[in-house]
Amino acid sequence: MKVFIDSSALVKRYIEEPGSGRVGELMGKAKEVAVCIVCVPEVLSACNRLVREKKINAGQYDWIKNEFLLDMGEFVVIDITNEVIIRSIHCLEKRALRSLDALHIASAIEYKCGLFVTGDQRQQAIASSMGLKIEIV
């Protein structure tokens, strides 16, 4: 199955929290794993926040960043195209949603994924209304 994973779920691959095991399981079973290019700054931003909050140290951050960037070479990376922008606008017009979340949903639709994996309840509801099969972790 082609799995699209958003940043809120992908970060669970590198930071142990509820849902981390399921993310690993889904990624391991997937025929392909796709992400939107915006996940790069989003995941690293989340990890930098954890450093500032002293929940992880600089060495742990460096390890996470290296592992994440290596993994990016294995993922199908969906770029921000005109089609993705147009689809994201449709998402934003459905109901309240952050712009980057709309880009994840639009990228997943454009990719024609079999499963959209997210950790974001609001995003999950809109993604479902856009016709995506969802798993929330």
Image (spheres, grey):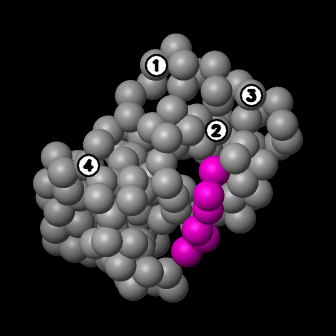
Closer mark to the observer between disc 3 and disc 2: 3
Q: Nearer the viewer, residue 29 or 74?
A: 29
Label pair 1/2, CB-CB below 8 angstroms: no
Q: CA distance from mark 4 to mark 3?
A: 26 Å
Q: Amino acid at mark 2?
A: Ala
Q: Which residue is mark 2?
A: 102
Q: Residue at x 74, y 28 (%)?
A: 90
- Find residue 81 and name its label: 1
Q: CA distance from mark 4 to mark 1?
A: 18 Å
Q: CA distance from mark 1 to mark 2?
A: 13 Å
Q: Earlier in the sequence, mark 4 or mark 1?
A: 4
Q: Earlier in the sequence, mark 3 or mark 2?
A: 3
Crowding near pointer 1: few (<14 within 10 Å), some, many (20+)? few
Q: Amino acid at mark 1?
A: Thr
Picture coordinates of residue 38, whole percent (x, y):
43, 39
Q: Which residues fall within the magenta stretch?
A: 132-137
Secondary structure state at the residue bearing disc 2:
helix
- Find residue 90 and name its label: 3
Picture coordinates of residue 27, whole percent (x, y):
33, 68
Label pair 4/3, CB-CB below 8 angstroms: no
